[in-house]
Image (cartoon, rainbow, N blue to C red):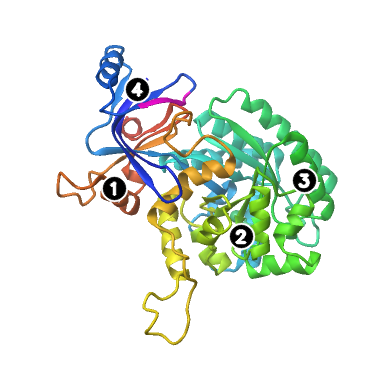
Amino acid sequence: FVVKGTAFTSINQKEVEVLENSLFCITEAGTIAKIIRPDEENYMETIQEYSAKKKLEELPADQYILPGFVDLHIHAPQWAQAGTALDLPLYDWLNTYTFPLEAKFSDKEFANEVYSDLVSQLLKNGTTTALYFATVHRESSVRLAEICSEKGQRGLVGKVVMDDPEQTPDYYRDEKAETAIADTEEFIKEVLALNTKTPQGVYPVVTPRFIPSCTDEALAGLGALAAKYDVHIQSHCSESDWAHGFVFERFGKNDAFALNDFGLLGEKAIMAHAGFLSDADMGLFAEKGTAVAHCPISNAYFGNAVTPVAKLLNEYQVEVGLGSDISGGFSPSLFDNIKQAVISSRMLEDGVDKDCCSEKRGVTGSRLTLNEAFYLATAGGGESLSLPIGKLAVGFAWDVQFVTTKELPIFTKSEPLLDIFQKIVYLSHPESIQKVWVQGRKVYDKESEKRKEEN
Ligand code: GUN
Ligand code: FE
């Protein structure tokens, strides 16, 4: 089929390209075969051909196409407490709120209810791919992958491993390292089998929660499993002073080097937060091809710090994407996280008026532009996962959201399209999203949802 409309896409970290009134030709497999611009000779011909076949979808004048968002770090079970429980620092938050909540996911019905609602909500928010932490429970973690498969979201799912009896509560942990590894292997096999039946892909992810919750034996076993099956790896890395300090005390080195010792860094590894990486840690990430999931809302609460994203991107060429970190971050919307990424980076930047202040504040060159933050939420996420997603380009998946500008302050017909783009990113809200597609399949349609509700 063919879609006709105006789209915005990152072409690199700094630039957004406008594809005005273009034709997006989508294959059976749900990938972009061709993009035809109005000045190309087969433009009119293609419109006629596909509209005769009733396979042309034309966007209304108020709607624009954006790539679907990639949420590079989200805790699915914590959806049940999103927007609450943000009054404690990380260690106390885990033990007071989060471990008791996650323990409830031994109940498969409860897991099904929360996970079904979350995946639907994320699709409605334009999140077409998500990299999930589930819980320690294998069966309900597989259920999350099934729900992604059924609802049409590209889901990368990890059964969480936490086996250290000194750092995890009796009511919520893997029985021991051996069972954690065996369960993870079984989980990998089940999700790989599901993947073959899922057009958009669902993927198993090796998921040590973070170093403090795992024994050396579990960490080593998980590194070996990731290598054996060539699957993605995720964890939390240098998130807070406490977490970072704990690892240094245990190993005499930072998280990055300790993870690497266990085979847990690499091209398919994505580490959340990374607010306290040293220069050597950043160099190691770059060398290994390991990506960072930047979680700017959550970092304000638990990291009490701003991850130096501009430095990671520009100085070290580390791949970076954006994560909501539900529920350490309260919002499932990557629009909200894009804005926070920009805002937080401005707080890390030095004072602009350098002559006026005697005291040096901030770090020069820390700012992220809106384009860069948008890149993180889309193409950066795709690159971090080594998947052809997050961009509107030939060979990429047709993972998109149609967004209306009806309620935006646009008063002149000749408003530059890149200004409209900025207004969309700063001022849209979830209700602005009209349709969402993953791998060429429509997974959300606001109109038909409304009709369903009315009946
Ligand atoms: N570190 C270990 N577990 C967690 C978690 O659930 N959320 C966050 N933000 N950090 C963690
Ligand atoms: Fe997290």
Residue 223 horizontal/vertical position (percent): 77, 45
The residue tagged 3 is 223
In which quadrant of the rendered image does the C terminus lie? top left
Q: With respect to residue 196, does 229 lie above or below? A: below
**Sequence-first tag of 1 and 2:** 2
User: Mark 1 to mark 3: distance in Å?
Assistant: 44 Å
User: Mark 1 to mark 4: distance in Å?
Assistant: 24 Å
> Can you tell which quarter of the image residue 354 is in?
bottom left
- Residue range corresponding to the magenta coloring: 30-35
On screen, residue 422 versus residue 436, left or right, reads left
On screen, residue 12 versus residue 188, left or right, reads left
**Sequence-first tag of 1 and 4:** 4
Report the disc number at residue 2.
4
Residue 423 horizontal/vertical position (percent): 29, 51
The residue tagged 1 is 418
In the image, 351 versus 341, the foreground residue is 351
- Mark 1 belongs to which amino acid? Leu
On screen, residue 128 versus residue 22, left or right, reads right
The residue tagged 2 is 274
**Sequence-first tag of 3 and 2:** 3
Q: Is mark 4 within 8 Å of ligand 2?
A: no
Query: Tag 4, which secondary structure?
Result: strand
**Sequence-first tag of 2 and 4:** 4
In which quadrant of the rendered image does the N terminus lie? top left
Q: Is mark 1 within 8 Å of ligand 2?
A: no
Query: Tag 1, which secondary structure?
Result: helix
Whether residue 14 is visible here, answered yes or no, is yes
